[in-house]
Amino acid sequence: MPSATLLGQSILSGLFIGGLYALMGLGLSLAWGYLKLINLAHLAFAFLAAYVTYQFVGYAGLSPPVALLIVVPAFFLLGVALQALYTRFAVGEFASLLVTFGIAVIVESLIQYFWTADFRKLQIEHGTASLRIGTLFVPVIEALMLLVAAALSLATWAWLRFTYLGKAMRASAENPEIAAAFGIDPRRLALLMSGIGTAYAGVAGVFIALTSTLFPAQIFAWVGVVFAVVILGGLGNPLGVLAAGLAIGVSESVTMAVTEPTWAPLVAFTLLILVLILRPGRI
Amino acid sequence: MTQATTQRWLGLARIAAATALAAVVGAGQADAQSGQPIRIGSTLALTGPLAATSQVHKIAGEIYVEQLNKSGGLLGRPVEWVLKDDQSKPDLARTLYEQLITADKVDLLMGPYATGAILSAMSVAQRYNKVLVHHTFGIPSMAKYEMHFPAWALGPTPEATFPNQLFDALAASPKPPKTIAIVTSKFPSVHFLSVGARDVAKKRGLQEVLWLEWEFGNRDFGPIAARVKDAKPDALWIGAIGLEGVMLLEAAKKIDYEPPVHFHLYPAPGPTAKAPEAKNALAATIFEQHAPFTNNPVAANFVKEFNDRAAKAGLPDNSVEVQAAASYTAWQILTAAVNGTKSLDDKAMGAWLKANRVDAIIGKLRFDGPSNYGDDLMKIKQLQDGKWNVVWPKEYAAPGASLKTP
């Protein structure tokens, strides 16, 4: 049996990686739920943001918060621009799979062109700093990442539920014709939602740069788990994505602590299959 | 932007200008070389998950072919390297090698990068009775073809010889470890050596306090670090590839743990050297760019060229170590076979290689042992003051360097 400390530390570790899963899944879930776009390029944008952060922090000497302030608006604009193109060419839900896969491949190639295929790791001062709570250690950056994931999920949920724009977004997703009859412009809302979703990829990218190793082909290694998070959490459901991310993260970590780490990747998909069997209307 | 990254933008403009210029003057220049070129075909994982290391092989190969052509080529003919991208997919490598032989009609083959792709290429080479020299095949017992020739001199049973080498080094330290944790990726060539290390440790009386495996591409090393900390080993064998070892050490640091002695099987040398947690890390190598290796003028010249080219290509690590040295060695083996037989006949070259030794930058190579493997030339290096130094065997140690243990 694992010690209480080992188990506690593993649960913490799972919460942190779960926070990253949620950050990566949030924008994808919003695009799929509200814009009917299965945006495979979302993960590529997250890694592009990670490389840009690596460049800003590792070479230009900017601090991570300053990098975040540059990356997030830039990626918001990128999301707006891409949505304008998707609308212009009437990209539908299934066509979006192909189109965004193509964009992901292009982004991967661009990353490889500019940063080479080699491994990159951002080394920052106090990057491994931790707080000690009893026998457990809480890594500062990972804890911050979890807080940001929780805050963004909560804020997005509140925005969708309580604000005029959020309600308009939901109405437009549910029935665009009726929403338009009430004066809602679905095109402008779609631009906003795409911008927000891509900006979230930017936020995820900053934390990926701070906590992970970077190499271009890694983009597609995350697809399975992030899609599992999005589907488990429910399309367009920010709090669901957070809960699913944390559940998968903790399940994986506890699996690693009590059995063989090789079993961990099976966890997300086992949970996904179970949910799809028990609640088939999830997707 | 890094200088290299910025230069890439300028590079695009230069490429456009150079293309236009080449169109004007190119035809006239082509006649300057005499004789039909000898075409050597190969693939490399220029894209996909193995692309990082393949860049090293590409640069090493380009340097070798350029040097070869400057010194008169092969059999008095220029050499042309026909290189294709196997996208890190062994099945695609198989198709491309087939294509190189049947459609491109290359004269000779050079191996691709990584064990899976090499196995694929080997099956094609066997079908067409072609010599296949390859750089970095990790599991010698799987190489059954009689005309494959490995540049990475692991010996026929590295799963026994290499761990023994490491444990010999540790046994000679002031405080030899009594317990060991072996944690490993399931990446095939890594896992195979880790399993071997487990057997060797047992035979040598080292108590195994932890054995863990993870899938290649694992994202979260926190729980693994926590288990290693719980096990309190005297030494930690990390069967890692790339930066998995650094990820594990960082995760350990975050829970206030530092393994006393840590060995990394195949780390990405440059980024690992920059990680503070990797201080005193041990790793496997066949070549490092310091004496006595660089006492060989060919090696010294290659090191200088590679350092420059890798810097221009924007690689984060410009130094010559296992991959670059094995790559250059593979070309040396192929050249030796052609020059030794004065022909491009694969059967003659294969027979010559089995009967002769090849003087390469990693040492004298022979191919007369089981599966065409000769001696295990692997060595132990250690990250000391941000630099990789060979520390074992002592006769290959960097000047003034010796194994540092707590």
Image (cartoon, rainbow, N blue to C red):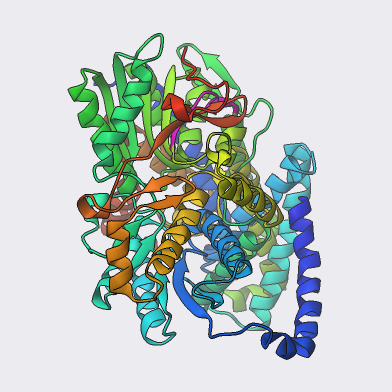
Q: Residue B100 at x, y = what percent?
A: 41, 80
Q: Residue at left 75%, top 63%?
A: B8
Percent of width and height locating residue B368 = 25, 52
Q: In terms of image quadrants, where is residue B22?
A: bottom right
In the rendered image, the vertical position of residue B393 relative to residue A200, given as above or below: above
Residue A223 or residue B212, whichever sits in front: B212
Assign the N terminus of chain A to one quadrant of the image.
top left
Q: Nearer the viewer, residue A206 or B41?
A: B41
Left or right, A184 with reference to A109: right
User: Does residue B342 lie above or below A247 as drawn?
Assistant: below
Q: Is residue A78 visible?
A: yes
Residue at (41, 72) in percent of width and height = B342
**Region in magenta:** B276-284
In front here: B72 or A167?
A: B72
Q: Quadrant of the C terminus of chain A?
A: bottom left
Does B361 appear in magenta?
no
Q: Position of residue A26 (x, y in %)?
A: 55, 52
Spot occupied by residue A74 in the image (x, y as percentages of width and height): 76, 57
Front-lying residue, B269 or B251: B269
Is residue B49 something that shows in the picture?
no
Position above or below: B243 against A107: above
